[in-house]
Image (cartoon, rainbow, N blue to C red):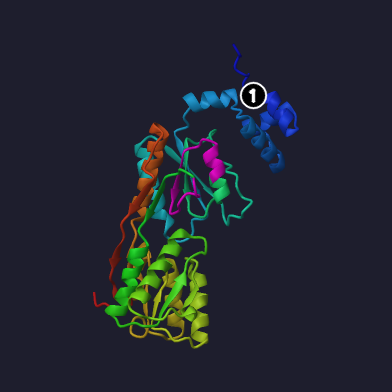
Amino acid sequence: MKKDSKPPSIDDVARLAGVSISTVSRVVNRNVPVSAEIVTRVESAMRELNYVPRQAARNLATRRTHTIGVLLSDMLGDFFQPLLTGIETVARASGFEILISLTGVVRPQDQRLRPFGLHNTDGLLIFAGSLTPAGIEQAHASGLPLVLIHQSPPTGLDVPCVTVENKAASRKIVEHLIVTHQRRRIVLLRGPADNEDAHWREMGYREALAAHNLELDPRLMGVGDFEREVARATIEKMLASDTSFDAVFTGDDEAAVGVMLALEARGVKVPEEISVVGFDDQRLAEILHPPLTTVRAPTEQVGQEAARQLIKLIRTGSADPLTLLPTELVFRRSCGCRV
């Protein structure tokens, strides 16, 4: 009777990767800095051999850090405060602490999760744009439980996602401008090019125009990037070029602030001359002058649900594939409504 082959050893990994046993140990234990090229070679060899370090296997079976990681690209603006409040509320109630890391602008080569991993977190919440698709695939392959926020998983990857309904609400708010306020030249300020929420909000804008037989004018589609100063600069250029428009759908509330500042600087009255509407219903929306008509996204609830799904995944090994939370229109004076 043929005996089962021996499980791969650290010697096998070192031989395949072309490094010393001590170098493999450093990569596994993360206790001494190792170059990215060496880490890639060792991890590739481990995957090829299906090598699981004994201590890592014991940790996976018995150890818990009672900590969940939160990976964000940045924390600028008012958007992230309610999101993090939601995450922390559920995490703490379930006996977990949270560990936050900011990635900044993510480039294609940025695939590693440090400082996060199985050694210091039980699972990871990944906000849209904070990790490349290749990085998500790598994290998933490591066995770390993951939940994505405002981002679908890469094709073929079984990773839960928590997000909000974008397209229908965007269509409705643009149709409100068309039907209720008779706006015909409506600017769209796009969000970041690779942002999923921005994509669906643009689809809603396009559908609203098509449903009312309005021309899709490329001159009325500009960059907003969900950032105040970017949106301000775009509207300033449109005003300077004498582009005719009577409304702006900013894509998010932070960009709406930039739009209002640009219009105010030129002496353009909102909403008498130009209507402005946003998305998210951040805290600043109701204190703007005039108060901002927008789409209320349940950002704190997104954080709560994301934390719940991750904790469920950590404890049971399964979670809901998609959690899609509803949004609603909030009418204030910036669109022309008298409320």
Residue at (51% x, 35% y) in the render: 143
**Residue bearing mark 1:** 8
Which corner quadrant holds the C terminus?
bottom left
Which corner quadrant holds the N terminus?
top right
Q: Is residue 74 magenta?
A: no
- Comparing 84 with 175, the one in front is 175
- Comparing 52 with 74, the one in front is 52
Can residue 322 be seen? yes
- Name the amino acid, label 1: Pro
Can residue 31 be seen? no
The residue positioned farthest toward the front in the image shown:
1
**Residue 81 percent location from the top left of the image:** 41, 54
**Residue 68 percent location from the top left of the image:** 46, 39
Residue at (35% x, 52% y) in the render: 324
**Residue 121 percent location from the top left of the image:** 50, 36
The residue positioned farthest toward the top in the image shown:
1
The stretch in magenta equals 137-156
Query: In screen coordinates, is 211 left or right of 1?
Result: left
Dividing the picture into quadrants, the one containing residue 273 is: bottom left
The residue positioned farthest toward the left in the image shown:
339
Q: Secondary structure at mark 1?
A: loop
